[in-house]
Amino acid sequence: MAQNKSLVSAIKKDLGILRAPRGAAQERRRRELLHRGLRWAIQIAFLAAFPGVWSAAFTGVRGICQSLGQAQPIQLTSFVALLVVLLAFTCVFGRFFCGFACAFGTFGDMVYALATPLRRLLRLDGKKLPGGARRVLQLLKYVVLVLIAWLCFDGRWGDVSSFSPWTAFAGIRAGSLSGISARALAVLGAIAVGMAFVERFFCQFLCPFGAVFSLLPVLPVSLFRRNRPSCAPRCNRCQDRCPVGVHPDRGDLRSGECIACGRCADGCPMANVSLLRIQTGVDAAAGAVAHSGAKNRSCTASNRPTSAKFGPGTGFRIIGTEVTLTLLKAGILAALCYAFA
């Protein structure tokens, strides 16, 4: 009962912030809430309009492996064409599809959100997997990818396809379980349990398509990056907000795990995370002055950089969560899905 009251109180507080934010911290929280709402709207729209894109594109992956196994030319089917389009889109814009448009990812986010009262009841809400365990488990999706690719290459995918959770998910989405095996439903149920307790459980640990995306090169302008010299000591807020637990560092070998959701940028109280940052001489000097006192600062709202650091005439940046930019990416992706799905 007390936990329900706490949840209601938090919702009321956020509604008040949306109506009339007070101070820099609440203004930042307001932007975070607006961006979160926009992301949910885009996710639901793609789930309604293009629910089968993930399955269709991964059918292209399986088809390529089967053709190679049979020593046959790879046919440019509609599935392969959609696969190529999504890969190209990801190389340009990062894993926006994973963060905003994947039906299975949206399903996972819904399960995680609906399970919040259960996690609070079990006192597990807010607790995350240890970093080492998470990093090891994230390697599992590459094992899943290799296993599926080998089964398709060897012509034995049909022997295990009855276990496919994607088939079960497609059946539930279509409102019919006809022809769906109990084994597929059991696997999907087990994944849903994981989704309830670990954010983006499937995407992080089991998604073979996510494994493919994480290996792709991405244009530097589409990768989130933190300005580390201006970070407060021991803050780690960007990684804590990240649903897959990575730092926004372009040189990090795990940067491919980023699903481009932008929560690192929204959650940084120092405004140090962005897609693009151009500094002039004045701006760089201001950054050096800020860095000289960083050792004595904590990661609080009052330490957020002032307009002198990124104000008019001193520098330029694209945070990456701007409404216009987000809608532009969503529009391009929707047009591609409409044309090829």
Image (tube, rainbow, N blue to C red):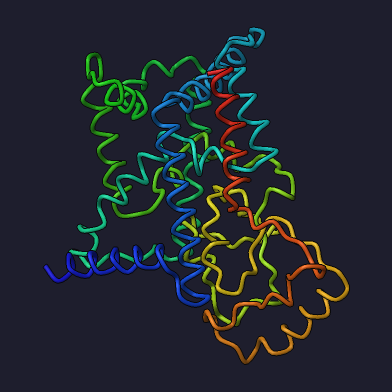
Where does residue 236 sit, x and y in percent of width and height?
A: 54, 72
Q: Is residue 208 visible?
A: yes
Q: What residue lies at 47% left-to-right and 66% top-to-bottom?
A: 240
Residue 47 versus residue 195: which sits nearer the camera? 47
Where does residue 35 sit, x and y in percent of width and height?
A: 49, 53
Could you tell whether 303 is left or right of 33 in the image? right
Q: What residue lies at 27% left-to-right and 65% top-to-bottom?
A: 124
Q: Is residue 153 visible?
A: no
Give the residue furthest to the bottom.
296
Give the residue furthest to the left.
1
Residue 312 versus residue 89: which sits nearer the camera? 312
Residue 211 versus residue 176: which sits nearer the camera? 176
Q: Quadrant of the N terminus?
A: bottom left
Residue 307 lies in what quarter of the image? bottom right
Q: In the picture shown, does residue 324 fall above or below 67?
A: below
Q: In the picture shown, does residue 46 fall above or below 339?
A: below
Could you tell whether 232 is left or right of 145 in the image? right
Could you tell whether 4 is left or right of 208 in the image? left
Where does residue 37 sit, x and y in percent of width and height?
A: 42, 50
Give the residue furthest to the right.
281
Q: What residue lies at 42% left-to-right and 68% top-to-bottom?
A: 20
Q: What residue lies at 57% left-to-right and 49% top-to-bottom?
A: 323
Could you tell whether 150 is left or right of 198 in the image? right
Where does residue 33 sit, x and y in percent of width and height?
A: 44, 58
Residue 307 versus residue 166: which sits nearer the camera? 307
